[in-house]
Image (spheres, helix red, strand yellow):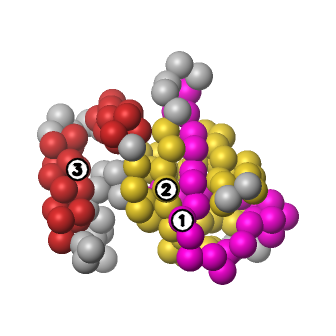
Amino acid sequence: MTDKRQFHRVMLNVKGHLAHNDITIEVMVSDVSLQGIKLLASETELAKLPFDSHEPYTATFKANEDSPSITLHISQLYRHSDSRKDDVSLGCKVERMGVECLSALRRLIALNSMDSGIEEKDLNALIDAVYQAPQ
């Protein structure tokens, strides 16, 4: 099976927050790219959020204590439960992010990649995706 991802994913395992309007829950950021993010959360915490809303959610995290905070406005794409695990996996698409967050995320990806050209490849893929998306 071929991997159809356009963007390099960075495996993390850091605490973060998922918010919708005035409700915020704690999550673990499992991995992240310029286009998507994978979150882990308990079913109890997820029950606090309105998953039938069409408004974007906000995910916020820091790669480590010294890193800048990264805030991504996301939409949920899929939800996966595994009876052998306590947490639910959420695959989310990044809808938008600020310039400062884009810069911090690019740096995080570049620093965690063995491919020296990955930053340019990911940025070009992001630009293509943004300009090809229906407005």
The front one of 48 and 13 is 48
Q: Amino acid at mark 1?
A: Pro
* Position of residue 45 measured from the top left corner of the image (x, y, whole percent): 80, 60
Instruction: Point out which mark residue 56 bears.
Output: 1
Q: Residue furthest bottom?
A: 52
Whole-Å distance between the Cαs marked 3 and 1? 23 Å
Residue 119 relative to residue 35: left or right: left
Mark closer to the observer (3, 2): 2
Q: Earlier in the sequence, mark 3 or mark 1?
A: 1
Q: Amino acid at mark 3?
A: Asp
* Position of residue 111 measured from the top left corner of the image (x, y, whole percent): 33, 30
The front one of 31 and 26 is 26
Instruction: Point out which mark residue 89 bears.
Output: none
| Dots 1, 2 in contact, CB < 8 A | yes
Q: Quadrant of residue 80?
A: bottom right
Span highlighted in magenta in the image: 36-64
Say which element carries label 3: helix
Disc 3 target residue: 122
Say which element carries label 1: loop
Whole-Å distance between the Cαs marked 3 and 2? 18 Å
Q: In the rendered view of the protein, which quadrant contains the N terminus?
A: bottom left
Q: Quadrant of residue 16?
A: top right
Badge 2: how crowded within 10 Å, few (<14), some, or many (20+)?
many
Whole-Å distance between the Cαs marked 1 and 2? 6 Å
Q: Residue at x 74, y 67 (%)?
A: 49
Q: Amino acid at mark 2?
A: His
